[in-house]
Image (tube, grey):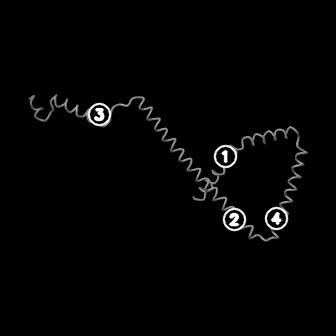
Amino acid sequence: MNDEAPDQLGTPTPEELREQVERAHDGLARTVGPPASEGDLAAQAKEKAAVVREQAAAVREQAAGKAAAASDRLREKTERAARAVEDRTPEAVREKTAQAAAQVREKTEQARRYAADRTPEPLREKTDRALTAARANRAPLLAGGALLVVLLLIRRSRGRNR
């Protein structure tokens, strides 16, 4: 075997290898750039967090606007429907309805008084405490109830789509 054969086949010399490594190193340095210091990374993270906070605030504002618009539309439709029903309901039916409502209110008041008179004192105290707690935590209770209604409506609509 001849030592000159590999050189003739294109094997690079050590000097050529050094030049190739330097060119590759320079290309990588331009592509990657200088290494970032820890301070730079912290500043970049803070900038990204600020951008995410701004985007989240914008989404919250947009959602609040859409919710308010949907609520207004629902209120208007409900009022129109109530007026339409009232306009189409005969006067005799309205009078009977008013009488029935008055009777229901009266019977409800009688039942309330009867229950208050017959309920033992310890049970009334516990009921009062529960009512006070519910009134104090009205917002979370209403939010939980609204969430429950939304979940039930979603489940119901998915059942129809199947």
Q: Could you tell me which secondary element the residue under label 1 belongs to? A: helix
Disc 4 crowd rating (10 Å Cα; few below 14, some 14-19, many 20+) is few
- Label 1 vs 2, first from the N-terminus: 2
Identify the amino acid type marked 1: Ala
Q: Quadrant of residue 28?
A: top left
The x and y percentages for residue 161 are 57, 59
Residue kind at label 2, given as amino acid type: Ala
Mark 3 residue crowding within 10 angstroms, few (<14) / some (14–19) / many (20+): few
- Locate residue 14 relative to residue 92 in the image: left or right: left
Tag 1 and tag 3, C-beta contact below 8 Å: no
Q: Residues within 10 Å of mark 2 (few under 14, many from 20)?
A: few
- Label placed on residue 29: 3
| Residue on which the image places disc 2 | 81
Please give the residue where the numbered disc 4 appears in the rendered image.
Answer: 97
N-terminal of the pair, mark 4 or mark 1, is 4
User: Who's the residue at 42% across and 32% down the image?
Assistant: 41
Q: CA distance from mark 2 to mark 3?
A: 71 Å
Q: Is residue 1 visible?
A: no
Mark in the foreground, 3 or 4: 3
Find numbered disc 4 in the image and state the secondary structure of the residue it sits on: helix
Q: CA distance from mark 2 to mark 4?
A: 18 Å
Q: Amino acid at mark 4?
A: Thr
Q: Is residue 14 above or below residue 71?
A: above
Q: For the C terminus, give its image quadrant.
A: bottom right
Contact, CB < 8 Å: mark 4 with mark 1? no
Q: CA distance from mark 3 to mark 4?
A: 85 Å
Check contact, mark 2 vs mark 3: CB within 8 A: no
Q: Give the CA separation, mark 1 to mark 3.
A: 55 Å
Chain-order first, disc 1 or disc 3: 3
Q: Specify which label sits upstream in the sequence, 2 or 4.
A: 2
**CA gap, disc 4 and disc 1:** 33 Å
Label placed on residue 143 = 1
